[in-house]
Image (cartoon, helix red, strand yellow):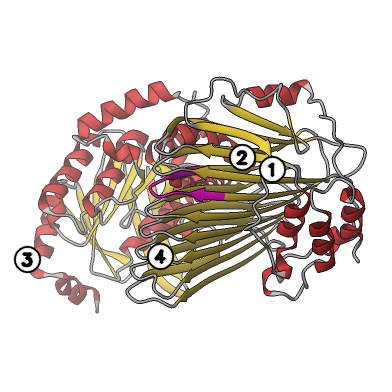
Amino acid sequence: MTTLLESIQTAFADIAPSKAALDQAIATGLPDPRSEQWKYTSLRALSARRFAAPPATLATLDDATIQTVSAIPAPRIVFVNGIFDAANSTLSNLPDGLSIKTDVYFDKGIHFDNPHEIFAKLNAAVASQGLRINIEKNAAIDTCLHAVFVSVKAGQDLAIHFRHKIVLGENAKLNLVEHHVSQDPQQHLVNHLCEVSLAAGAELTHARIQQDDIGASHFLRTEASLLDKASYHRLDLELGAHLSRHDLQVNLLGDGATVNANGSLIAGGRRHVDTRLDIRHIAKNTSCNLFWRGLATERGRAVFHGGILIEKGADGAAAHLSNKNLLLSDNAEIDTQPVLVIHADEVTASHGATVGRLDAGHLFYLRARGIPETQAKAMLTHAFCKETLKVLASDELIDIVSPHLEKMLQTIEVTA
Amino acid sequence: MLKIENLHVRVAGKEILKGLSLEVKAGEVHAIMGPNGAGKSTLGNVLSGREGYEVVEGSVIYQGKNLLELEPEERAAEGVFLAFQYPVEIPGVNNTYFLRSALNAQKKYRGEAEIDSMQFLKLVREKLSVLHLKDELLHRAVNEGFSGGEKKRNEIFQLALLEPKLAILDETDSGLDIDALKAVADGVNLMRSPERAFLVITHYQRLLDYIKPDIVHVLADGRIVESGGPELALELEAHGYSWVKDRVTP
C-alpha cells in the first residue's frame, strides 16, 4: 500500500462516516500510471506523502485573510480547512427559495466503481462537510452566492475533503462563485466532490477560481446532470496549487439541455494543471460549447482532455470544443487531447486543439504602434487567457472573476 | 526627414529591393507606385522594422538617426507609422485599451506625460468626430469582426490619434469601395501638415485622385526607376506598367 493511502486510512479510520467505503477505496489503490486517465499526470511524489485528518476545531484566520474574505460580497459561505466558519460567513437574509446546509447528505445512488476514480471514492467515504445548496422551483436568485474555501497551515499536512451538492428545481436560477484561497504556504491535499443537479429549465452559472497555495494538491470531481432545457454555464480558472486535477462530467439527460464550460489552465513555475472533460450527450437536441485555454511557462505543465460522447439516440446534438494553448518556455509542456465519439445521427460537431507561441503578426502590429515587446507579449497573453470569461453572461460576474486572473497573469514571465 | 540610399533588402534569401534610393522632406506627400512584386510592401515593412527583412546594403536615415538600428516600437515612438495593408485581428485585446497603451508607450519613450483615461476618451471623441467614425469600433477587440473598410478606417484613426511624423500607407486603398476610399483619403488629407510627411504606396492611380501627391515614384524590380509630378501617375494609368518596364530594361 502507498504511504498516501495508508496515512489516509489511519487518519480517517475512526471518523469516516463509512468505514466500509473507506476500506474499499483504500483497497482500490492508486491508479496505474499507465492508465489512460492518468497517463499525463503522475501521482508518484504524492503517493509517498503522509496526510492527517483536519482538527475538529476551527482554525482562526489572520487579519489579512479576514480582510480578503470580507471583501467578497454577501451572501457568502466560508469554510476553513474543511470546516464551516459561521463567523466569517454572511448567510442571514438569504433570498427566498435558496437554502444552504453544510452537512453531507449521502446519496446511495452515486457510485464510483472505476479504479481511476480513487479520489472521488475516497471523498465519498470520508467527507463530512460541504456545500449543500437547494433552490426551489421557479426561484430566480438575483444575487450571486459566494463560496470561499480557505486553507490554513497546520502542524501536519492535512487531507481535506468536501462533498458538495447543488440542486436547482424546475426553472430555478443561480449564480455561484467559488473562491479557493490559501492563508499561508502549505502542502495540504484538498479533495472536492461536487454533484450538480439541474431540473427542467433550470439555469446555473458557476465560476470557480482555484487559487490554492503553490504547495497544495487540489482534486475536484464534478458530476452534473441536466434535465430538459436546463443550462449550465461554467468557468474554471486554474490559477493555483502544485498539482491540480479536475474531472468534469456532465450528463445531458434531458432534451435541449445545454452546457457551456470554459476554463483557463495557467501552469507557471513547476505547477501541473490537469483538466479532463467528459461530456455525455444522452437526450435529443442537446448542446455543449467547450472553450479552453492553456498556458504553460517555466517548468509548468498543462494537461487537457476534452472528451465528448454523443450516445445513440441523441439526435440533433451540437458539440463544439476549442482548446488552444500557449507554450511560452522550452521547459514547459502541454498535452492536449480532444476526443469526440459519435453514435447518433444528425449531429453537428467540431473540435480543435492547438499548441503554439504568440502570433508574430499580432506582436508586430502592437510593436509597430509603439508598445514595447515585453508589454505587447503580456497584452497578448492576458487577452488569450481571458477569452474564456465570455461564458459569464453578466458584467457583474466578469468584474468579480477577472481581477483574480489578471493578478495571477502578472506573475507569469513571458519569456518566449 | 527620411533619406534612403542604395537600399538592398533580402526576404527569405531572395533580393527584393535592389538599390532603392529616396528622399522625403517634411510636409511632402510621396506616392510609390509599381507593379505587383516590385517591392512596394517590402519597403513599408523594412521601414517599420518587421522581422524577416534582411538589409544587406545601404542606409536609412530618419531625422538624423539610423532607422534600421531601432526596434519597431522605437521607430513608432520616433514618429514612424505604418498603415498596414492587412491589419490583423487581435481577439481579446480591446481597441480602446490598445490605443491608449500605444499612445502612452510612445509618450513614455519621448519623456512626455502619459494621459489618463478621461483625457484619452476626450481625445478619442475629438478624432472620431473629425473622421466621421462611429465609436462602436472602440468597444470591440482590435479589428475583430471589422469589415475590410472598417479595418482601413481604423488604421487611419490610429494615424490621427498617434500623430506620427512620417506616415507610410501600404496599399491602404486595396479592397475598398469608393465611399470607403474617399473616407480614408479625407482622413489622410486632414492629417497633412508642413511637419508631416506621407509615403503612399499603391498599385492604382485611383487613390491619388483623392490624395494629391507632390512627387510620384515608380518602383520596379526593386528600384525607383522614374520620379516625377502627379502627371506621372496619370501616364502610368494610361500606358500600364509595361511601359515602365520597357524603359527599365536596356
Identify which amino acid the numbered label 4 is placed on.
Ala
How far is the residue under mark 4 from the one under mark 3? 68 Å
Q: Which of B106 and A114 is in front in this view?
A: A114
Residue B79, position as x, y percentages in the image:
41, 39
Are the residues under badges 4 and 3 in a single subunit? no
Residue A309, position as x, y percentages in the image:
49, 70
How far is the residue under mark 1 from the one under mark 2? 7 Å
Element assignment for label 4: loop
- Specify the subunit that label 2 lies on: A
Crowding around mark 1 (Cα neighbors within 10 Å: few <14, some 14 to 19, many 20+) is some
Identify which amino acid the numbered label 3 is placed on.
Ala
| First in sequence: mark 2 vs mark 4 | 2
- Specify the subunit that label 1 lies on: A
Q: Nearer the viewer, mark 1 or mark 3?
A: 1
- Specify the subunit that label 4 lies on: A
Residue that label 2 marks: A132
Magenta segment boundaries in residue numbering: A196-205
Residue B132, position as x, y percentages in the image:
18, 34
